[in-house]
Image (spheres, rainbow, N blue to C red):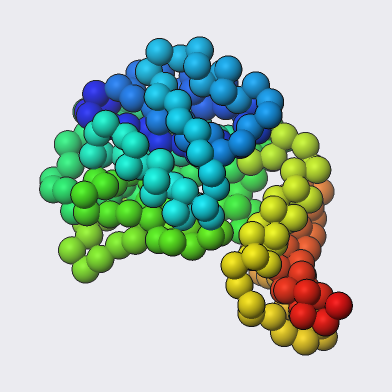
């Protein structure tokens, strides 16, 4: 089946992780890399792989950009990856023999999340199951600018695949700050929803409490603390940027 699946990846300045991602997809028939503005070695890394089809264009929000990248693939069956993810050898072997029952089938794949080389399954980073394998004639990403997902219907047949995608989520702690700024900035430009600063503070506090206490981040040592603090900051700036624009 690997010869009938196009891996689709959108990139921007992904040189730190893309080499491992592309090495893990070497056996697939095609890997579509859609780059939106890299000024590091991302494109050179992509060009070094014979099965990579490299495209360049603008960023339209995560959902629309991923849909555009999917449209560039040669095959209808698509495995969507982020540029900091790797296909495990076990998953690759499984997909090589996989036979979908129908085009309505989607693969719900387990994602293992790593922070600075260590697996983390607390603080909201565990039980991470995502629809990543689908037929583009039946399924597509929604149009969310952030936190996009594959749209399902009443006809969708979900097949759980307990063989992991390895997510190299964080190589250094500054990436948390970069992601908070990136996601909150996209939201500032695409949404007008906000609330009073007191409510923003309360929601931010609850985000920390939920991650660190309710979801067990406290059991993950300093990594759990960083995740909870980042979740709290993400909520704060998601709403506060919009509020500040309205009241400056």
Give left or right: position of 22 versus 242. Answer: left
Give left or right: position of 21 versus 5. Answer: right
Give whichever of 156, 114 is nearer the camera: 156
Residue 203: horizontal and vertical position, in percent? 73, 78
Q: Residue at x 57, y 23 (%)?
A: 43
Give left or right: position of 65 versus 138. Answer: right
Q: How many marks?
A: 0
Q: Residue at x 51, y 39 (%)?
A: 57
Q: Residue furthest left?
A: 102
In the image, residue 119 above or below residue 61: above
Look at the image and tell me in which quarter the N terminus lies. Answer: top left
Give left or right: position of 74 versus 83. Answer: left
In the image, residue 186 above or below residue 56: below
Give whichever of 118, 60 is nearer the camera: 60
Q: Residue furthest front?
A: 57
In the image, residue 98 above or below residue 247: above
Q: Residue at x 39, y 49 (%)?
A: 67
Give whichever of 186, 28 is nearer the camera: 186
Location of residue 184 by image quarter: bottom right
Location of residue 180 by image quarter: bottom right
Question: Does residue 50 appear in the picture of this structure?
Answer: yes
Location of residue 172 by image quarter: top right
Question: Does residue 228 appear in the picture of this structure?
Answer: no
Q: Residue at x 40, y 61 (%)?
A: 142
In the image, residue 112 above or below residue 30: below
Residue 21: horizontal and vertical position, in percent? 52, 27
Residue 248: horizontal and vertical position, in percent? 86, 78
Residue 138: horizontal and vertical position, in percent? 22, 54
């Amino acid at each position: 089946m690997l010869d009938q699946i196009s891996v689709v990846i959108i990139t921007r300045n992904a040189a730190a992780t893309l080499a491992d991602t592309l090495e893990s997809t070497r056996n697939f028939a095609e890997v579509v890399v859609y780059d939106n503005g890299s000024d590091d070695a991302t494109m050179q890394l992509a060009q070094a792989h014979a099965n990579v089809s490299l495209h360049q264009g603008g960023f339209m929000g995560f959902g629309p950009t991923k849909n555009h990248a999917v449209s560039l693939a040669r095959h209808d069956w698509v495995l969507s990856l982020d540029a900091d993810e790797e296909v495990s050898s076990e998953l690759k072997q499984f997909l090589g023999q996989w036979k979908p029952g129908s085009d309505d089938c989607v693969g719900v794949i387990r994602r293992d999340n790593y922070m600075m080389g260590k697996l983390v399954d607390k603080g909201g980073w565990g039980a991470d199951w995502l629809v990543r394998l689908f037929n583009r004639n039946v399924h597509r990403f929604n149009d969310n600018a952030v936190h996009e997902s594959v749209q399902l219907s009443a006809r969708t047949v979900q097949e759980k695949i307990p063989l992991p995608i390895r997510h190299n989520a964080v190589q250094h702690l500054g990436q948390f700050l970069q992601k908070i700024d990136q996601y909150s900035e996209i939201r500032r430009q695409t949404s007008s929803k906000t609330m009073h600063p007191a409510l923003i503070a309360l929601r931010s506090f609850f985000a920390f409490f939920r991650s660190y206490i309710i979801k067990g981040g406290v059991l993950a040592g300093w990594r759990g603390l960083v995740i909870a603090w980042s979740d709290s900051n993400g909520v704060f700036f998601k709403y506060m940027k919009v509020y500040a624009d309205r009241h400056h």
